[in-house]
Image: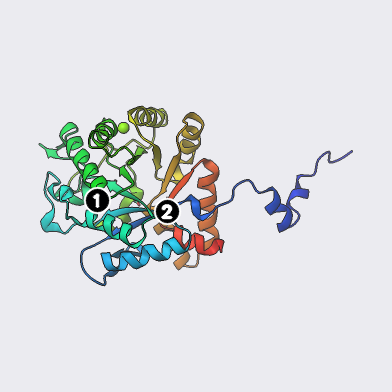
Amino acid sequence: MYPLKRNRRLRTNEAIRSLVRETILSPNDFLVPLFVVEGKGVRQEIASMPNYYRFSLDILEKEVKELWAMGLKSVLLFAMIPEHLKDNKGKEALNPKGLMQRAIKTVKNACPEMLVMTDVAFDPYSSYGHDGIVEDGEIVNDDSVEILTGMSLSHAEAGADFVAPSDMMDGRILSIREALEDEGYTNTGIMAYSAKYASAFYGPFRDALDSAPGFGDKKTYQMDYANRFEAIKETEMDIDEGADIVMIKPGLCYLDIVREIKNEVDVPVAVYQVSGEYAMVKAAAEKGWLDHDAVMMEQLVAIKRAGANIIASYFARDAVKLLG
Ligand SMILES: NCc1[nH]cc(CCC(=O)O)c1CC(=O)O
Ligand SMILES: [Mg+2]
């Protein structure tokens, strides 16, 4: 008898396809990155990220209420720091009245149940645009970790639910975990950017925060994109040091790593679909070369299918709207 099996039977129409579909996106999958700036009534479109904005805190308040109403319950905050507050030690990052600290409180006041995660990194605060203190042209590790730890405590004190160190210094997860425990922030979680690659896909983000490195690149701390075993080592170390959630970044080019890590570890795995991935889809769609919504959904489902439990994405809002 030929053919023995007909796989196309399960693809005959949308009803059967949806019945056997293996991966379903929902609003619960998403973490929404948000950029904040000083000012009032500010809603600045980011040039290289069409339809994505920097918000002043009054607008942020409205934004998070809307997100909550759409079923989006977690945000990841990034602050744009004015040039005159940047230095080599990230002093402003520890300011209890700094923009990030006020943003955390703004979200919590507007929407108390919204899960607030914060970016813990130096670069938006650094006069060099690097993720650590610069000494003789090098990014030093241990002194930087000390500041990242202080920064994490400061965010916890302001009310952050999770801190998300995105710097790739060695040992920072242990240092942050110990400090949080010592200060009584036992319920403050850590989402570690564990396998963060030195990627050209971060370009638009660095426009968004005006945080591009002033010299050199980030290859002495972010991972070489040619490497796979190293991603597993980094991730396992962060889990041993106390990470509650691990992250892989960027998304699409790294889904092999996502699957591999998902198979290895027993903590939730997050994936960051980064700014350059967003910008590429927007640009191609603007030209009429790609179907925006179709490509967006295909990419997001692929990220989840690869093993992501959490997707940080600038498409979160658009995708959830489309899910209906
Ligand atoms: N610590 C900085 C940071 N945190 C998140 C991103 C990139 C996110 C994106 O491109 O969307 C970066 C950029 C970088 O490492 O240079
Ligand atoms: Mg590491």
| Residue 56 visible from this viewpoint | no
Secondary structure under tag 2 reads: strand
Q: Quadrant of the C terminus?
A: bottom right
State whether residue 298 is above or below residue 39: above
Dot 2 or dot 1: first in sequence order is 1
Q: Residue at left 36%, top 65%?
A: 63
- Quadrant into which the N terminus falls: top right
Ligand 1 within 8 Å of the CB at mark 1: no
Alpha carbon separation for disc pair 2 and 1: 24 Å
Circle nearer the viewer, 2 or 1: 1
**Residue sitting nearer the eye, 142 or 59:** 59
Q: Is residue 176 left or right of residue 251?
A: left
- Tag on residue 302? none
Q: Which corner quadrant of the figure contains ligand 2?
A: top left
Residue 121 image-quadrant placement: top left
Pick the front one: 63 or 248: 63
Total residue callouts: 2
Q: Are marks 2 and 1 in contact (CB under 8 Å)?
A: no
- Counting from the top left corner in percent of width and height, residue 123 is at 21, 48
Query: Residue 250: x, y in percent?
Result: 40, 45
Horizontal relation, residue 40 to residue 195: left or right = left
Provide residue 190's location: percent of width, then percent of height.
Answer: 34, 39
Residue in front for this viewpoint, 79 or 233 = 79
Going by the numbered disc 2, the residue's amino acid type is Ser
Q: Is residue 227 above or below residue 208?
A: above
Q: Which residue is mark 1?
A: 158
User: Of the numbered discs in the image, which one, if any, rests on residue 313?
Assistant: 2
Q: Residue reaching furthest front?
A: 184
Residue 222 % position (x, y) = 30, 38
